[in-house]
Image: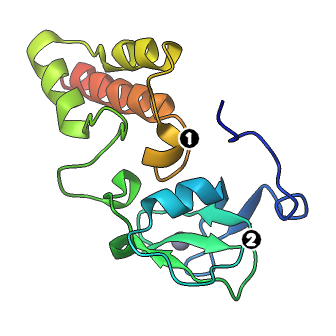
Amino acid sequence: MSDCCSVNAKSGTAPVAMACPAKGGRSKRVGMLTVKSLVRKLPLKMPNTQYYFCDASDCDVVYFAFDAEAPRFRREDLVVRIGAKETADPIPICYCFGFTRQDIWDEIRSTGKSTVAERITEEVEADRCACEVKNPSGKCCLGDVTRTAKDRLSQKKSRG
Ligand SMILES: [Zn+2]
């Protein structure tokens, strides 16, 4: 059983979302387990504070803390590429099963539809995903997968 929904003592006082100190992007809470899993090299004596995930594309900061003294982490500090911050392929969308934006686009190009969301849903239902330790947002990627496919399909339609 994962503890992703539990509230620890520190996060009890921290707001649900905060503005990123670098560019002001609205950033949501992210669990410490996610931060610890995805930051390449953790600093010694990292304080146990509430961290936030900034997904703004024009911002280099990925994680910052409620406690302003706590270290911030940038794109290069993480073991994965942050899909929301990348403009060049590969742009990861699903971090558990490795689907990229290109995979979704390729399937749409060859079959006219996208089955990635369905395939991931099956894995999620069977409890075979690991979003909390693989996705930098700490959340499930299904929303992003669905959005990416929908955007591509409507682009295709409008082009005729
Ligand atoms: Zn930011």
Give residue 82's quadrant in the image.
bottom left
Residue 69 to residue 146: above or below: below
Image quarter where the C terminus lies is top left
Asked whether mark 1 lies closer than 8 Å to ligand 1, one says no
Residue shown at the point (28%, 29%) measured from the top left: 152
Residue shown at the point (52%, 13%) measured from the top left: 125
Can I make out residue 160 in this image? Answer: no
Q: At label 2, which amino acid type do we have?
A: Thr
Question: Of helix, strand and loop, which one carries label 1?
Answer: loop
> Where in the figure is residue 40, as x and y percent of width and height?
38, 69
Question: Of helix, strand and loop, which one carries label 2?
Answer: loop
Q: Nearer the viewer, residue 66 or 46?
A: 46
Which comes sooner in the sequence, label 1 or label 2? Answer: 2
Look at the image and name its color scheme: rainbow
In the rendered picture of this protein, how many numbered marks are placed on residues? 2
> Where in the figure is residue 67, as x and y percent of width and height?
75, 80
Q: Residue furthest left?
A: 110
Give residue 19's quadrant in the image.
bottom right
Residue shown at the point (37%, 24%) measured from the top left: 150
> Where in the figure is residue 127, as x and y percent of width and height?
51, 20
Residue 153 to residue 90: above or below: above
Residue that mark 2 sits on? 49
Residue that mark 1 sits on? 139
In this rendering, which labeled residue sits more in front, label 1 or label 2?
A: 2
Q: How busy is the neighbourhood of tag 2: few (under 14 within 10 Å), some, or many (20 plus)? A: some
Image quarter where the N terminus lies is top right
Q: At label 1, which amino acid type do we have?
A: Lys
Compared across the picture, whether 105 is left or right of 69 comes to left
Can I make out residue 3 in this image? Answer: yes
Give residue 108's quadrant in the image.
top left
Compared across the picture, whether 1 is left or right of 12 comes to left
Q: How busy is the neighbourhood of tag 1: few (under 14 within 10 Å), some, or many (20 plus)? A: some
